[in-house]
Image (cartoon, grey):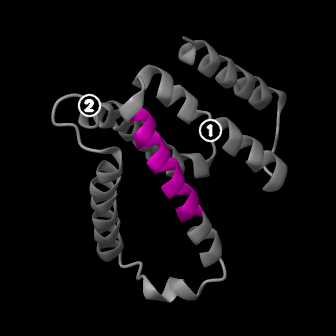
Amino acid sequence: MDATATTYLPYALLAMGAYALVSPLMRVATTGPNAIPSDVAVVVSNTLLVAMAIGVIAYTGQGFTAHLASPKLAHVLAAGVFLGIGILALYRSLSLGPVSVVTPIFAMFLVFSSVIGFLFLGESFTARKGLGIAFAAAAVYLVSGA
């Protein structure tokens, strides 16, 4: 394992573990008696996300306003638009369908993000990675099939 993996891997594993709970919790919150509308759930959960991010920025002393002049801000804004669309659609689909089908379909973003990395960001593509992507797509097909 290279040195950079030791810095990002714990965060990736934490993200995986935390994100594994989002879909089941939102499915429970947005269905049945006293269900919260999915759009309201987006606002509430993402308000908490913003508050947590502000806390991390304050704690780490990263600053905020200095980065608003970055030429890469357009990428952050575009990512925010797509994140908003994705979260709104995910929460809505969870309010309408089963977690066991919705979440694997949603998780296909991992395959598409990987392909974008290979095609447009110059990341290395190997036969092993290609096989992994094929297996991931097959797994989503098998898990989400009715």
Which label was assigned to residue 28?
Answer: 2
Left-right relation of 15 to 144: left
Residue 44 lies, in percent from the top left, at: 27, 56
What secondary structure is marked by label 2?
A: helix
Q: State the residue in front, 47 or 30.
A: 30
Q: State the residue in front, 64 or 92.
A: 92
- For marks 1 and 2, the one nearer the N-term is 2
For the stretch drawn in magenta, the main secondary structure is helix
Which residue is found at the position 71% from the left and 25% from the top? 132
What secondary structure is marked by label 1?
A: helix
Q: State the residue in front, 146 or 6.
A: 146
Which residue is found at the position 58% from the left and 62% from the top? 79
At label 1, the amino acid type is Leu
Which label was assigned to residue 110?
Answer: 1
Residue 83 lies, in percent from the top left, at: 52, 55
| Count of numbered marks | 2
Left-right relation of 41 to 103: left
Q: State the residue in front, 67 or 31.
A: 31
Give the quarter of the figure containing the N terminus: top right
Q: Residue furthest left?
A: 34
Give the residues drawn in magenta, as a range. Answer: 79-94
Which residue is found at the position 44% from the left and 20% from the top? 100
Query: Nearer the observer, disc 1 or disc 2?
Result: 2
At label 2, the amino acid type is Val
Asked if 45 appears above or below 126 in the picture, the reply is below
Q: Is residue 86 magenta?
A: yes
Residue 137 lies, in percent from the top left, at: 68, 24
Asked if 83 appears above or below 33 in the picture, the reply is below
Left-right relation of 21 to 123: left
Report, in whole angstroms, how far the alpha carbon at label 1 lies from the one at label 2.
Answer: 24 Å
